Image: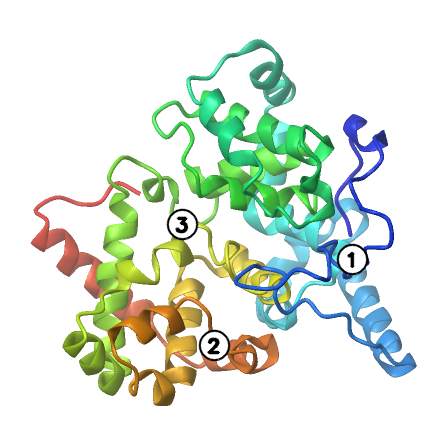
Amino acid sequence: MSRKRTENDSESGPVPPHVPVDRFGFLKQEHGNSPERFSKARSTSATDHDREERKVRKWRKMIGVGGSDWKHYVRRKPNVVRRRIRKGIPDCLRGLVWQLISGSRDLLLMNPGVYEQLVIYETSASELDIIRDISRTFPSHVFFQKRHGPGQRSLYNVLKAYSVYDRDVGYVQGMGFIAGLLLLYMSEEDAFWLLVALLKGAVHAPMEGLYHAGLPLVQQYLFQLESLVKELIPKLGEHFTQEMINPSMYASQWFITVFSYSFPFPLALRIWDVFLSEGVKIVFKVGLALLKYCQDELVKLPFEKLIHALKIFPEDAMNPDTLLPLAYSIKVSKRLEELKLDYEKTNAKPVQP
């Protein structure tokens, strides 16, 4: 894993004796509705290993030393970059590539010393809320498991720094899963600037409206999703209407945490690769693909069972190699823009992202 070492990493990790972890660092005995739910260790053949090595070499050539060739390659061959990102960024390069495609590396270079200032010298009104929530973030990952350990301290620092950097947003609970995911692949300072890039919109539309009071951007996204379900999966959309199911009952966390809260970790990573490259439309595409894939079962269920099924999807539906090609085939960009305008007309004023 490509998270850089920090001064806190010298402390021994919180792995209990004889408890195996998967390749992402989650305890293997954990089950239930958690990101590590399907992170099963896979036996890799020599052929798989060789294929992965070739993939890594292609990516290293594409990005250059420390990302020095990235912008040039993107300008020359944008379709190749898009195709390779959709196939999945090599895990050993994921942290660096995420910083390059999000624009956060540029923010870091333009703001030397700012993160240290925010962490060490500033105080936040959200500090107690952050401390209260920290243990709920990836509790079965070895990096975050130890109370007051290096992972929890790093997570606290990033969230506290952001709450000071943007006092209008401050801290909202769902931000912990995003910051936690980033910290598994990069240093505190890098994770902070990627969080800034996402919420302030360095490359794509700003996400901060997801966390403003009243969650205005979440409301817009749920309106758009509900309309898309009715249009693209009409049989399921009609069943949802009959059972009085609306997207706020199952999809809010999809947007607030970009699937990092309850989706299998390997799938969440693949979604994040595309999300950072192509923007929020991939969240709609994946959500719609998941509902489409499962609709034959979902349309049979009454309200109570439907609510449960929409929170814990079957394992085969969560296979990235099955779900993501289906998601990529769903075209939503134009319709999302039209539905955004419809939402703004209905609500009298534009949603501030």
Residue mark closest to the camera, 3 vs 2: 3
In this rendering, the answer to whether 140 lies above or below 328 is above
Where does residue 91 sit, x and y in percent of width and height? 74, 59
* Three-letter code, disc 2: Tyr
| Element carrying mark 3 | helix
The answer to whether residue 10 shows anywhere in this view is yes
- Name the N-terminal-most of marks 3 and 1: 1
* Three-letter code, disc 3: Ile
Pointer 2: what residue? 328
| Element carrying mark 2 | helix
Distance CA(mark 3)–CA(mark 1): 27 Å
Q: Quadrant location of the C terminus?
A: top left
In this rendering, the answer to whether 277 lies above or below 158 is below
- Name the N-terminal-most of marks 1 and 2: 1
Where does residue 216 sit, x and y in percent of width and height? 25, 44
Pointer 3: what residue? 256
Crowdedness near tag 2: few (<14), some (14–19) or many (≥20) residues, C-alpha within 10 Å: some
Q: Residue at x 40, y 50 (%)?
A: 256
Looking at the rendered structure, the number of numbered marks drawn on it comes to: 3
Crowdedness near tag 1: few (<14), some (14–19) or many (≥20) residues, C-alpha within 10 Å: some
Pointer 1: what residue? 21
* Three-letter code, disc 1: Val
Where does residue 189 sit, x and y in percent of width and height? 65, 30
Q: Quadrant of residue 81?
A: bottom right
Distance CA(mark 1)–CA(mark 2): 32 Å
Task: In this rendered view, identify the residue nearer to me: 273 or 163.
Answer: 163
